[in-house]
Amino acid sequence: MLESWKTVAWNGLSFRVPPQWEVSSLATSYLQLDDEVGPVLELKWQQIKGLFSFKTHLKKLSRLSTSTPGVDFQEIPLPHDWQQALRNFEVQSFVWQSTEVSGKGAILYCSECQKAILLQFYQKRGGDDSRIQLEILHSFRDHSEDGMVPWALFGLRALMPQRFVLVRHRFHPGHYQLEFQHQKEHLHLNRWGPADLLLKGGDLLAWFNKKCKELNWCHAANMREYDYDGKPGLQGQSQGSIAAASRIWARVTRKLPYIWVRVWHLASRNQILGVAARGLKPLNEQMLEEVCSNYEMV
Amino acid sequence: MRWFKRRKPSKDDFSKGPSSRSESLAYRPVKSLEVSEEKLDSGEVVLTYTLTVRPWMLSLATRLGLRSEETLSRKLQLDEMGSLTWSLLDGKRAVHDLVDFVCRRYKLNRREAEVAMTGFLRDLGKRGLIGFRGPSGKEGEKST
């Protein structure tokens, strides 16, 4: 059963879920997953500065539930089977019940990375998902040990250095984009598809020249054909800026941004992947190579 | 104060519609008989359909001499994926069958294909080009 499960990894959190569960709502620190019928799991998290108080947050939740008519909220001792799965966290668990649906969840606090997580499973009347819930909790991670943060959503998989923070994301049919930032350094992961439709009647370079308007600073890179690990691709780099404001700023500060772009056609998945980076200091090409090699679609 | 209050749909109306995502995906899109289609050499499909105009607009257009076939009809050219989807709308295939087909054909992630397909069908429904037949042979067509 567990072999068919898939990994969901988003902004520091990662866990495995049944294959029919899909992310239905997404924000920088929020995830909701649905099955065929409706919501099944909700997660919200936040970096905590200073002391974390379970009491305050449970009180907030309790107040929220009492203001909703027909919802009964209750703090409960942590279920015995959850204790083992969540042994790395400080935990307070709760249940709530309304006429049609009930929920079981917990507030987790990781003292190692100072992250507080609100996690709740929705339960339909008559359904018992306790085994699934337990498996998810066993696979649950809120930080990585090796300094590389996993990202896995809608078939996209990547590993990013921990210092890069997600600043923007979009998952539109046909185009996924994740933008990360560390100080003045920006890193974009792109995915376009289906490639056979996009590349129809032209090659990758012709398509990129049309497409690079979306990535307004990318056309500063002098793109050349490039064989990336046996896959047809393009690569370019330059030191210069296109945007007028940046150009003026660059003249004033005498700093021209460094740009590095690689795009490759993943024929096996019928998609085009792209990694683009921009920074005021010379870019770490070894790190970019590592990002590219860990960036894939499954 | 509002003179004309919008009547809230009764609970019975809601129960007729899909109550979950899986139920919505089981609906079967049906082409409107009012739509004429033309296939281009490129394989893309051009749909021609009549605009639904309010009666007073129609009478105004007639008085101003603007009423003609051209002004009351619109053309919509579908891209390759849209044309393929259009060709699959036979009233027998459910939305999830179309999603599965597109997933396999273009190697797309299922969620992505589902969002693209439902968005496309919603757009066609808004223009009155398709209706939806209930799952498992339920009578009564439902338009979006």
Image: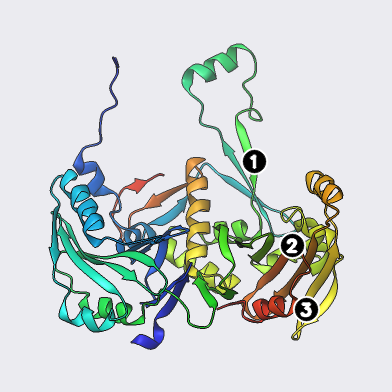
Of the 4 image quadrants, the one containing the N terminus of chain A is bottom left
Tell me, for residue A186, which label it has, or none.
none
Above-or-below relation of A138 to B97: below
Residue B18 is left or right of residue B125, and the answer is left
Q: Which residue is mark 2?
A: A279
Residue, x 40% and y 75% (percent of image)? A112
Above-or-below relation of A121 to A286: above
Residue in the foreground of this view, choosing between B86 and B121: B121
Residue type at mark 2 is Gly
Residue type at mark 3 is Pro
Q: Which chain letter goes with mark 2?
A: A
Q: Residues within 10 Å of mark 3 (few under 14, many from 20)?
A: some
Q: Which residue is mark 1?
A: B75
Q: Tell which circle, 2 or 3, labels the residue nearer the N-terminal end.
A: 3
Residue type at mark 1 is Lys
For residue B24, which quarter of the picture?
bottom left
The answer to whether tags 2 and 1 share a subunit is no
Work out how far the residue at label 2 is from the one at label 1, CA to CA, in angstroms: 47 Å
Q: Which residue is mark 3?
A: A232
For residue B40, which quarter of the picture?
bottom right
Work out how far the residue at label 2 is from the one at label 3, CA to CA, in angstroms: 26 Å
Question: Which label lies toward us, 1 or 3?
Answer: 3
Residue, x 78% and y 78% (percent of image)? A232
Question: Please, what secondary structure does the residue beneath circle 2 have?
Answer: strand
Residue in the foreground of this view, choosing between A231 and A237: A237
Q: Residues within 10 Å of mark 2 (few under 14, many from 20)?
A: many
Scheme of colours in the image: rainbow
Q: Residues within 10 Å of mark 1 (few under 14, many from 20)?
A: some
Give the x, y percent position of residue A52: 31, 62
Q: Which chain letter goes with mark 3?
A: A
Question: Which label lies toward us, 2 or 1?
Answer: 2
